Image (cartoon, rainbow, N blue to C red):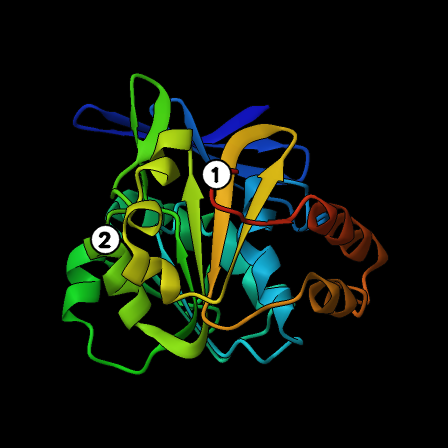
Amino acid sequence: MAIIWQQTIGDDRYEVRTAGASIRLYSNGVFHSQYNPEREISNSIWDLLILPTFFYPVGHVKRILILGVGGGAAIKLLHSYAIPEKIVGVELNPTHLKVARRFFRITNKQAELVCDDAVNWLKNYSGPGFDLIIDDLFGHKDGETLRAVKLDSTWLTLLNKNLTKQGLLVTNTAELSDFKNSGFMTNKRIRHAFKSTYKLTHPTCENRVYVFCKKEESLKVLKQNISQIPQTLARNSMLKLALRMRKFQIGSQ
């Protein structure tokens, strides 16, 4: 692994490393993003974040909001496989956005990148709703990742407010308590706002990704849509991930 760029700003140290064809972003030693143009679907956490788009055929998820851009790995994957009309990425850290543009090659055509606090940005947002919102808001402490915004009732209500009637909300969690104490578990009104909920896991990481669906969604349909991916390697990798996707039941966090 080679370090191709590094910068220290205050107490924060940023590095961009390469490993083969992969490009990786590290902040204070914490691994934030990875993208491999030769093998875009790499069985990573970012694959889980985009998997729910396949509840719909390619091109049907038109407007996407990503809260927490990092280096932009999810943006690259969504641009390649969901083919939306619009991606907006909101990121608090300007250095991350610098890396996303320079090293992950996120262009204005691929996404509109906004440097702002995600909570404040969404509170002030007054545009059309999004078909998909990905909440990947993470910070780090003592070399460990942790959610930057709690999944409480206030936050989930705000996210839900900005979804379309058939929208999908994808949230990334690092600890079981992130979801166990969430507004979804404690507030029936929020729980009833979504017709179906799924949990995604990956054998190589402890993160749990939860998918909140405004309408009843079918794993059968998701797998059928994945089977239409023309790239054999990407199709097979996504199908393997889909096999680990489970409909969520209260008490099975």
Name the amino acid, label 2: Ser
**Residue sticking out furthest to the top:** 142
Image point (33%, 31%), residue name: 146
| Contact flag, marks 2 and 1 (Cβ < 8 Å) | no
The answer to whether residue 199 is visible is yes
Q: Mark 2 Cα within 10 Å, few/some/many (few <14, many 20+)?
A: many
Examine the image and state in which quarter residue 127 appears. bottom left
Q: Which mark is residue 251?
A: 1
Residue 209 at x, y percent in the picture: 50, 45
Examine the image and state in which quarter residue 228 appears. bottom right
Which mark is first along the chain, 1 or 2?
2
In the image, taking residue 138 as reference, residue 200 lies left or right, namely: right
Q: Tell me the residue that label 2 is attached to.
A: 153
Image point (56%, 57%), residue name: 50
CA gap between label 2 and label 1 equals 19 Å
Name above or below for residue 79 compared with residue 152.
below
Q: Mark 1 Cα within 10 Å, few/some/many (few <14, many 20+)?
A: few
